Image (tube, rainbow, N blue to C red):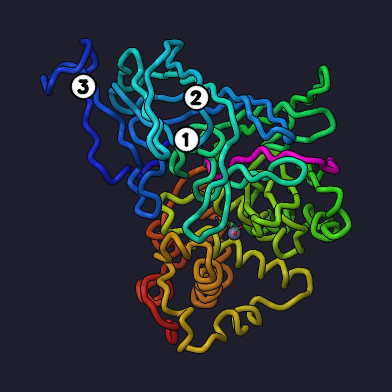
Amino acid sequence: LIAQGAQPAFASSGDHGKHGDHGNHGNPGRPHYSAGAASVGDPYFPDAGNGGYDVKHYDIAFTYDPATRIMDATTTITAVATQGLNRFDLDFRGPEISSLTVDGHRSAFERSGQELVVTPRHDLAKGRHFTVVVKYKGTPPVVTDPDDSIEGWVPTDDGVFVPGEPQGSPAWFPGNDHPTDKATFTFHATVPEGVTAVGNGRLESQKTKKGWTTFVWDSREPMATYLSTVTIGNFTVTKSKTPSGLPIYTAVDPRLVTQSAAAVAQIPDIVEYFSSIFGPYPFNTAGAIIDRAPDVGYALESQTKPIFSSAPGVGTMAHELAHQWFGDSVSLSRWSDIWLNEGFATYSQWMYTEHTGGATVDQTFNSTSNYGRAATSSFWQTVTTDPGPVDMFGNVPYNRGAMTLHALRGKIGDDAFFKLVKKWAASNRYGNTSTAEFIRTAEKVSGMDLTNFFDVWLFQKGKPTTW
Ligand code: ARG
Ligand code: ZN
């Protein structure tokens, strides 16, 4: 799925016709084939994503043994060419490739950095559906982020913890690693009997044969690559349903069951509460993966199965579940708009705290970690809509982002604010959007000119004083 209105920054070479054969050096009336772009042009991650095609589905099948840390994998990508292609890139940082085919033909490929450059045996006409099969074997890497945190394929003492935001998924499968190209996913993970592999979506089957268990997970709603996970280890699995019938699958490291019990018990209530203010939960299943991955130290809103690297509190659980609407269903077009994900998730967490009898959102807004910070604090010197790759998961997108939403609620009133939030979730469901689109929607729903409001909260440095 390629986002509308999220075109790459580079100029794409047009298609000059429908018939004929190979490259024609600009003759009109004949098709034109060229290389797909090596990136989508996102300034925060200049190599991320690729141009020239739109992935529809990933089928990722592998065997993984935590004892040897060897993965033996076959990833099948189904895509559509969005231009005539004689070459295209995938993002991949994984182990050695033994074979690569395009529509069944062995194809030449080269690797440099995270780019896997594929030259298909036959050119691909614009609009053509094609299938890429990549076989690889070895140990997928840990990826280090601009903020020095780690992601990708992170071994634990009993398996592997797999977070992918913002650039971890190419560690373990080749793909188009940018949120603007969402796709459906199927995972077939084969692990030693007794070990559990937990992926996004629904568990379609779990079969054991000769000491190995294959878990098939199916993610039928479109998903950004960074939200994919297959996290592996010893887990205590619990299956339940929310009062309205949504299936919940939780996998908890047995050593963390007691400490995380309170947060896990709240999942149905959190989902029901957020559904009442944001509109229907966007996916056909919910849950959580709670693991011990001390070197990771953060949680992530992996689609339908947020992952936690230690026992979460109720606030963190609420934060990751709110992301299912904001971030997962409603996604970014550019990473610089990360406040749309983190501000919404943080504000949702504040609202859940108030809902359950804790601090009111007004109190949290005014606290010393938020608006109560001195005007001289360096906190106010980061622009909310451009934190940079190092601080994209720092305080500003989270807290100034949430403050922006609370201030907006005060400015336009509760009725308009909750109408806006519902409309935002509904009209961008499974899509990609932007700050500019948020401002347009807020002005439309409220009927107000919010130029100055958004200017001081989102585009200027400094502590806002009037808005
Ligand atoms: N989006 C995650 C959360 O707030 C945080 C991811 C942090 N990732 C990182 N590489 N620092 O729920
Ligand atoms: Zn978050």
At label 2, the amino acid type is Ile
Q: Quadrant of the C terminus?
A: bottom left
Q: Position of residue 316 (x, y in %)?
A: 70, 62
> Dot 2 surroundings within 10 Å: few (below 14), some, or many (20 or more)?
some
Rounded to the nearest angstrom, the CA distance separating label 3 from label 2 is: 30 Å
State whether residue 108 appears in this view.
Answer: yes
**Picture quadrant where residue 111 is located:** top left
Q: Quadrant of ligand 1?
A: bottom right
Q: Residue furthest front?
A: 68
Is mark 1 in CB contact (under 8 Å) with mark 3? no
Question: What residue did someone put label 2 on?
Answer: 97
Q: Secondary structure at mark 3?
A: loop
Give the residues in magenta.
Answer: 225-239
Ligand 1: does it lie within 8 Å of the C-beta at label 1?
A: no
- Asked whether 233 falls inside the magenta stretch, the response is yes
Q: Position of residue 137 (x, y in %)?
A: 58, 26
Is mark 1 in CB contact (under 8 Å) with mark 2? yes
At label 1, the amino acid type is Phe
Rounded to the nearest angstrom, the CA distance separating label 1 from label 3 is: 27 Å
Q: Nearer the viewer, mark 1 or mark 3?
A: 1
Q: Secondary structure at mark 2?
A: strand
Q: Secondary structure at mark 1?
A: loop
Q: Is residue 291 above or below residue 312?
A: above
Q: Earlier in the sequence, mark 3 or mark 2?
A: 3
Question: What residue did someone put label 1 on?
Answer: 92
Rounded to the nearest angstrom, the CA distance separating label 1 from label 2 is: 10 Å
**Picture quadrant where residue 89 is located:** top left
Q: Is residue 44 found left or right of 311 in the rendered image?
A: left
Question: What residue did someone put label 3 on?
Answer: 32
**Picture quadrant where residue 259 is located:** bottom right
Q: Nearer the viewer, residue 211 or 251?
A: 211
